[in-house]
Amino acid sequence: MTRFEKLPTLAAVESIGFLLDDQFSLVALAAALEPLRLANQLAGRSLYRWQTLSLQGRPLRASNGMWITPDGAADAAGELHGLILCGSDAAQARERPELERYLRQQAQPGRFLGALGSGSWTLARAGLLEGHQCSTSWRCRVDLQRAFPGVALSAQPFVVDRDRATAAGGAAGLELMLQLIAGRHGQPLVRAIAETLAFELVRCEPLPAQMPLHLCGDEPSPKLREVISLMESNLEEPLELGQLAGFVALSRRQLERLFERHLQCSPARYYLRLRLVRARQLLRRTRLSVVEVAAACGFLSAQTFSRCYREHFALCPSDERRTPQVALH
């Protein structure tokens, strides 16, 4: 591994606490921690230090059933530059006055607050996302939007809005941390981290095959934009049409009419096109196998992926890498 060089020296090591809620996602926690470890390793010095916390310092059970012993209790964490709540899908089902009170105490100038997955629900209930954009798990998206109208819910997988940083969970936590690292230490370090993780920074690129909404004739509906953002943010695990419609308070038929009016195609067809264009990006710009690309774009089998790809591009996925890299369309 090559050490990253020429990183500007900053005076302070940034200290980040990860506050674990019961039934938190271990995947989301690991995805958020690994970029910090690699930032230190590639820079050759400590840029970040971190600690895992629980309210009382006691072990907690993760959502996969594993018991995790945190580094300590939240009130003994010392000075933090940032605090990230690793949320639980059960957050909506119970009131957590002690947790919410602690989070409000941590909302201090010069400190950012964040959340992974459904942790955004707890931040919102504590009044800490009012007037901010945020991302959250799709499981609590509709309820959060209804319960907290003062929160600007984004369909993006992660959002950094001033001193708030939220991610939908899973790999989105990794992307969120890369964004935070880039803001403090620059893109070259982030690219080195991503390369070490074999993580391709292609999801942040625009999807060149989608029809520009300003060319769609009538002024596009905000709900159409919201659904398309949801589609773009959920390519690996595609949402069902009923879920997409529910997120924007439409019936399935209303959603279908919206797409026909503005894009002259069905929602399912548009969603498939987005996934295939992302697959084309991955085939051309990464070393992922066809099977891996299929999985990354939400196809349950390589056979189904190959058939859809061939029908759309008149080319087999295995032949794609042998074609000249021209503009995608």
Image: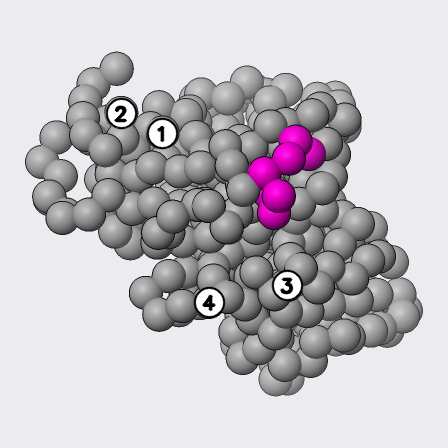
Residue bearing mark 1: 37
Q: Residue shown at 43%/30% (left/top)? A: 34
Residue bearing mark 4: 107
- Residues at marks 4 and 1 touching, judged by CB atoms closer than 8 Å: no
What's drawn in magenta, residue-wise? 54-60
Q: What is the C-alpha distance between the residues marked 2 and 4? A: 30 Å
Residue bearing mark 2: 41
Residue bearing mark 3: 100
Residue type (three-letter) at the residue carrying disc 1: Arg
Dot 1: element: helix
Is residue 263 at all visible to an observer of this figure?
no
Asked if residue 58 is among those painted magenta in the image, a careful observer would answer yes
Which label sits on residue 270?
none
Q: Which circle, 4 or 1, is nearer the viewer?
A: 4
Query: Is 277 displayed left or right of 66 in the figure?
Result: left
Q: What is the C-alpha distance between the residues marked 1 and 3? A: 29 Å
Q: Give the mark nearer the N terminus: 1 vs 3.
A: 1
- Residues at marks 2 and 3 touching, judged by CB atoms closer than 8 Å: no
- Classify 137 as above or below 322: below
- Residues at marks 4 and 3 touching, judged by CB atoms closer than 8 Å: no
Query: Is 38 displayed left or right of 218 in the figure?
Result: left
x and y, in percent, of residue 13 in the image: 24, 43
Query: Is 84 displayed left or right of 241 in the figure?
Result: left
Q: Which circle, 2 or 3, is nearer the viewer?
A: 3
Residue type (three-letter) at the residue carrying disc 3: Glu
Q: Nearer the viewer, residue 39 or 275?
A: 39
> Which picture quadrant has residue 277?
top right
